[in-house]
Amino acid sequence: MRIAKNLGEDMTTWFKVFTLFFVLLLSYGCVATGSQKINAAGRTAGIEAGKATQAEVSALLGFPAIVTYGEKGQETWNYYYVTEYPTATDFIPVVNGVVAGFQQNTKVLTLTFDRQGVARNLQRSEATGNPEVYPY
């Protein structure tokens, strides 16, 4: 009777250790890049087209990842936040070569300012998927 109880305790301990190891392994592969500030909904909620200025946006979010210039003097600022994380199939040797692995979550904030530095157009978007299918 005592042997069966010890065996059950050993299996429970082994299962807990394996589960902890697997969770740590999955979380270890997460990678993020870009402006994490656009990830916080409260931070970008106050930015409105027709009201926000370049100075306010810059103070709130910092410098954009990409700036483009239009023919009429407008500036378009692009902010990105990309998180890439592994899926369970990434850790299975044969399967990871056949099945799409890493998943990606991309958030984009695009603001277009007029010559006076006031935001005239604001777009928010978010996409989740495989980076091979949806590259940022």
Image: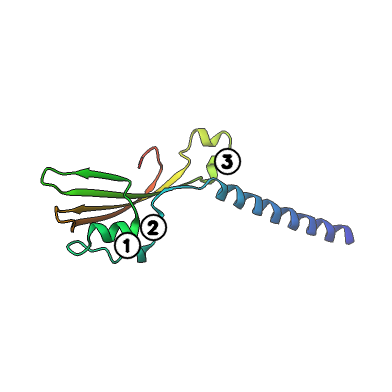
Dot 2 lies on which element?
helix
Task: Tell me which amino acid carries mark 1.
Answer: Thr
Horizontally, is 48 left or right of 26 in the view? left
- Do the CB atoms of the residues marked 1 and 2 lie less than 8 Å apart? yes
Disc 3/disc 2 C-alpha distance (Å): 31 Å
Residue occupying the point 23% across, 63% down: 48
Nearer-N-terminus badge (1/2): 2
The foreground one among 15 and 1 is: 15
Horizontally, is 14 left or right of 53 in the view? right
Judge depth for marks 3 and 2 and give the one in front: 2
Judge depth for marks 3 and 1 and give the one in front: 1
Could you say which quadrant of the image residue 6 lies in? Answer: bottom right
Q: Which residue is mark 1?
A: 44
Crowding at mark 2 (Cα within 10 Å: few <14, some 14-19, many 20+): some
Task: Tell me which amino acid carries mark 2.
Answer: Lys
Q: Which residue is mark 2?
A: 37
Could you say which quadrant of the image residue 131 lies in? Answer: top left
Crowding at mark 1 (Cα within 10 Å: few <14, some 14-19, many 20+): some
Residue occupying the point 36% across, 66% down: 42
Disc 1/disc 2 C-alpha distance (Å): 8 Å
Dot 1 lies on which element?
helix
Residue 130 location (% of width, % of height): 41, 42
Nearer-N-terminus badge (3/1): 1
Residue occupying the point 45% across, 39% down: 100
Q: Which residue is mark 3?
A: 91
The foreground one among 31 and 78 is: 78
Disc 3/disc 1 C-alpha distance (Å): 36 Å
Residue occupying the point 68% across, 51% down: 18
Task: Tell me which amino acid carries mark 3.
Answer: Phe
